[in-house]
Every structure is written in C-alpha cells, then in structure tokens.
Amino acid sequence: MENIEPKSGFVNDINMILATDFYQLTMGAAYYQYNLENNISEKDDIAIFEFFIRKFPKNRNYLIFAGLEQAVHYLKNARFTKRTIEFLRNKDVFKKIDPSFFDEFLPKFKFILDVWAMKEGNFFFPNEPIMRIQGPIFHAQIAETYLLNVINFQTLVASKASRIKNVAQDKVLLEFGTRRSHSPLAGVYAARASYIAGFNGTSNVVADLELGINSTGTMAHSYVQKFEKEIDSFHSYYDIYDENSILLIDTYDTEKAAQKCREFGNKIRGVRIDSGDLIEHSRKVRKILDENGCEKVLIVASSDLNEYKIKEIIEKKAPIDAFGVGTELATSRDDPTISGVYKLMEYNSKPRIKISEEKITYPGIKQVFRIYDKNGIFKEDILALSEEAPPSNSEALLIPVMKNGKLVDELPKLDEIQQYYLNNIKKLPDQYKTLKETDIFKLKISEQLKKLTKSLKEKYI
C-alpha cells in the first residue's frame, strides 16, 4: 500500500491551520509583536516542546503511539490563506498587532520545525515524551492543538484496539465504529488506529480508499425485512455476491435462519449474529451448519463487543471466527479520554519547568532509553536528558522525523507500521497485557535529570 497523503477534502475542506485554540493565535501574535519591538529574530527565539501522556486511562498498563502521519501531514501542508489572514486581521483583539504580521509574516508562513518521535505502533508509558518539537516559538506554539487532537485520539483508540487484539489473538477483528464515532473523520482515524494495533479490516469505506485498509460488511436487518420471506433475502444477496456473501441470521430466529442457510452449503463465506447470547447462539449455529455440510462457513459476531466480552467468548470456546467491534472501540467507551499534554521544556537553550499541584514536569530536552533483557523482552525505560550517554544495551525511542520542516526519511507505509506493532508488542511482558490496571510500571529517572528538576524547583518555589 502506498503511503498516500490525504486528498483534498479527506481531512477537511476548511484550512486546517485554524483547527486550533484561539489562544494559540493570540500568543503567536504576541510573540511576533514582542520580537518586532525588541528586534529579535526567529533564530534567536527557539523553543522546545515535548508531548507526553500524564497518566493511564482506566485499566490500562501501557499505551500505543499512533497519529504521527497525520501530524506530519499538517506540519508539511498547513498555510495561512488570504481568507484566514483577513479573518484574523478583523478580530478586534489583534488591533495592536503590527500590520506586517498580516501583510508579510502570515502569507509566507510555513512550519520550519525539527521533530523527533517514537515509531508509530510502539508501546509507551506515562510521562515519556512521544514527540519533541523544536523551532521558532511561534511555529512550535500554534502546532500544539492539532498535534494533541490527532495523536491523543488515535493513541487512545490504538491502545484500546491493542487490548482487544491481545485477547482475540488470531481471530479476525473488524472495526465497525464509524456510526458511533464522534465525527466522520474520527471514524477514519479510528479505522487507522485500530489497524495499526492489529485489526484486519474496517467498515469505513474512506479508510479503504485513502489508506488502503480493507473495507468489509454484510447486510443490515433492513435488507432482510424488505422481503416477505427471510430466505428470499438470502437468495437475493447470494445471487449478487456469490461466495462473498455473509448472511445476517438474527433478524427473527437465529437458529431457524441458520437452518435456511444450509441449502447454500459451503458456497457462502459466512453468517453473522448481531444480538442475543452470542456464546449460546454460536454453538447452536455451528452445530446446525456442520451437520448440514456447511463446515467451512464462518461465524461472525457483533453486538456491543469489547475486550471483556471477547475474552469470555474465547475462554468458553464459543465457535466464533470473527468479531466486529464498533462503539466500544471507536469511542473507547470505558475511558474515552487521554491526558496528553504539550509542554515547553527549553527556551533558547535554557531549561524550563512547570510546577503546580500534582503536575510537576521533568524539564529540559529528554530522551527515553529502553532496555531489554537477554531474551529481547522489555525490562525498563529510563528517562534521561538527551545529552546523557545512552545506557548500555539500550534503544533510544525518540528518533528524528523532520528537520527544518522537511522529512528526514519517508514515513513507513501503514502495513509496515502494523507489522512493526505486531513484532514489537511481543517484547512487552504478559503482565502488562492484563485487562486490569496493575500499576507495575515504574519509570526510571536519571540522576542528572533529577538534579536539574530539583534545581529548577528550588529556583521557582
């Protein structure tokens, strides 16, 4: 699959440079005005921000990084157009901003940031930077909201999908959440994030067209209801889709419908059950199919599935071959938020710290060093200043992605990101993959970083 940048209209026809919080623009304009009045150039106004998650969502023991491709697309392509510039110029709040901001700076603006990030699909933990952004403070500041939006959401969904994949193992997993996602675009991003974490397909057709994630589906109850006889709906569908037919059998009586499917033998691909006791129904349906020469017909289950229900289904050895997971995945229903933040860590080579109740951040430019045991299994992560020598046998997780607004290397294709996830998640011990929060992860902090944090706390408190 090609690494396709979203086409016009895929993300939004509205210029995404204004997909931000208004205070990013008021701060940005204030930075510009201050620098203009004090004769400060952009090269003398360099900020470094880091993106990290403060704490786990409920019942999580690890997270999966996702959304980097969309973040990079924004940083490469967002521009101030004539319309957006005039919109801002006419805001009364900007009346004291020098006209050159609107006439010269904004028309020529493009992001010239350096970006480091973890690889998409990598597992990580709270308080570890997953991205580092460096450049003129105006550039780094106004990028905040968009980056938080796309990465927080996709990381949330990918982390949920990973939990489901852990319990489903080799079963087919299909993302069905678009109709319950919080916008059409969120549906596309949910398909992408779940695919990264090992799902096999999606119901979302845009995700197939633009991202190459195979879209799939069966039929709705309305298709069956259109016909006077249930069997006529099955014949109609089969006449059109042949061996690709998956027949929905729970509109009236699941087991009676399964009996009707026997006349198709193994010519249909499968049947779908979308209600009731999935474990009991699937056992009865499998028995009916097997006794009537339909042993190759798959059973697909949907109906408000999540990792807990799928775990029970598998533990009870219900004969279900594929799961369609919708609402619980695309909205991460058990905890639909994630505490991703974007904080200033250094300004013009001087470390910065934010101190407030329960929200102390580690200052300075940092790196996450991951250490594995002799079998290649995750052992610990060490948060250190980037200037520190790497620990022996460690892997630096933040790698260069952009330099001066341009890609350092081509981003991996989506299939490659998924394969990286599937290989990398094997390095995470099983104790992290339980469905209950275990509080087993302890981030190790380097001594130099501890000293820097202590000195800045003493300075400002």
Image: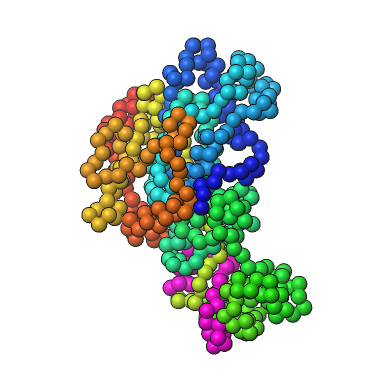
Which residue occupies 33% across, 56% down? Answer: 427
Which residue occupies 58% across, 74% down? Answer: 270
Please name whichever residue, 359 or 325, is drawn nearer the observer in this view of the structure.
325
Q: Quadrant of the C terminus?
A: top left
In this picture, is 9 found above or below 96?
below
Residue 166 part of the magenta segment: no
Q: State the image coordinates of residue 301 (x, y, percent, origin top left).
A: 56, 70
Q: Is residue 331 visible?
A: no
Which residue occupies 57% across, 87% down? Answer: 292
Q: Is residue 372 visible?
A: yes
Please name whichever residue, 180 or 386, is drawn nearer the observer in this view of the structure.
386
Colour scheme of the picture: rainbow
In this picture, is 367 found above or below 274?
above
Residue 307 part of the magenta segment: yes
Q: Judge left or right: residue 51 versus residue 11.
A: left
Which residue occupies 34% across, 29% down? Answer: 457
Query: What span is in magenta?
Result: 288-315
Q: State the image coordinates of residue 28 (x, y, percent, origin top left).
A: 54, 24
Q: State the image coordinates of residue 55 (x, y, percent, origin top left).
A: 42, 46
Please name whichever residue, 310 or 371, is drawn nearer the observer in this view of the structure.
371
Considering every residue shown, the one lying at the far front of the view is 2
In this picture, is 39 found above or below 413?
above
Q: State the image coordinates of residue 137 (x, y, percent, origin top left).
A: 48, 25
In this picture, is 118 found above or below 243?
above
How many marks can you see? 0
Please name whichever residue, 234 or 280, is drawn nearer the observer in this view of the structure.
234
Question: Image quadrant of residue 96?
Answer: top right
